[in-house]
Amino acid sequence: MGQNIGFEQNGKGKDFVRPIIILKKFNKYMFFGIPLSTKMKEGRFYYTFDFIKANKKVTNIALLSQMKLYNTNRLLNKIGVINKEDFKNLVDSFKNLLN
């Protein structure tokens, strides 16, 4: 997702690659996304879920407090799909942050 500043999570490598969940697509150019991490974190600002990547179960943490608007040009490739129940719970967890 590119190099960030301050407390924002950087990606890895020279291209600062970081997985992200697309929360809401607006058009072919913009979407709301939530960056992911594999470092275990707890609290209301995080949502933990598993998905299958390359035939292996992977645990990820959605960094709810870092949700922001992204340009679709930042997307490189699709690595997996979150199941519907986890996606609904993730959205509910994000909505709870706003209350």
Image: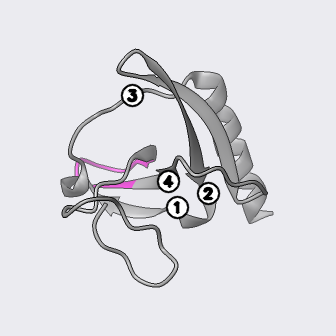
Q: Tell me the element at label 3.
A: loop
**Residue marked by disc 1:** 67
Which tag, 2 or 3, sits closer to the chain's start?
2
Question: Could you tell me how many numbered marks the image carries?
Answer: 4
Q: Mark 2 near mark 1, Cβ–Cβ under 8 Å?
A: yes
Label 2: few (<14), some or many (≥20) within 10 Å?
many
Label 4: few (<14), some or many (≥20) within 10 Å?
many
**Region in magenta:** 23-31
Q: Mark 1 near mark 4, Cβ–Cβ under 8 Å?
A: yes
**Residue 53 rendering spot, x and y as whole percentages:** 40, 25
Residue 4 showing in the rendered view: yes
Label 1: few (<14), some or many (≥20) within 10 Å?
some
Which tag, 3 or 4, sits closer to the chain's start?
4
Which tag, 1 or 4, sits closer to the chain's start?
4
Task: In the rendered view, tell whether residue 90 sits above or below residue 31.
Answer: above
At 36% across and 53% down in the image, what residue appears?
18
**Residue marked by disc 4:** 34
Task: In the rendered view, tell whether residue 40 sits above or below residue 16.
Answer: above
Q: Nearer the viewer, residue 25 or 52?
A: 52
**Residue marked by disc 3:** 80
Q: Mark 4 near mark 2, Cβ–Cβ under 8 Å?
A: yes
Q: Nearer the viewer, residue 41 or 91?
A: 41
